Amino acid sequence: MKCNIYGTSARYFATVNAIYARYFPDDPPARIFVCIPEWTGPFDIEIDRVAVV
């Protein structure tokens, strides 16, 4: 599994890490955090995830 996390500011990085650790305490999936300037949606973070069942 891999998560791509896009945020409008680097200030969200610590919060995302804390939440990520809560949901994946052991052996967390690979992830990236990418800062992007803005988008048209009413949100500041978008997560794109690929999982294998």
Image: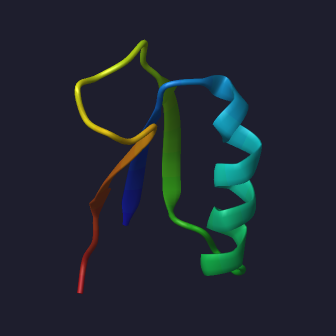
Q: Position of residue 42 (x, y in %)?
A: 32, 39
Q: In this rendering, does residue 27 appear at all?
A: yes
The quadrant holding residue 26 is bottom right
Would residue 27 appear left or right of 49 to someone viewing this image?
Answer: right
For the point 65% across and 25% down, the residue is 10
Rendered-image quadrant of the C terminus: bottom left
Residue at position x 25%, y 77% from top? 52
**Can residue 24 be seen in the rendering of this structure?**
no
Q: Nearer the viewer, residue 24 or 6?
A: 6
Q: Position of residue 8 (x, y in %)?
A: 49, 25
Where 19 sits versus 30, above or below? below
Left of 29 or right of it: where is 53?
Answer: left
Farthest bottom residue in view: 53
Q: Is residue 1 above or below residue 17?
A: below
Residue that appears at 66% across and 65% down: 19
**Image side of residue 33 versus residue 48, left or right:** right
Q: Position of residue 36 (x, y in %)?
A: 42, 18
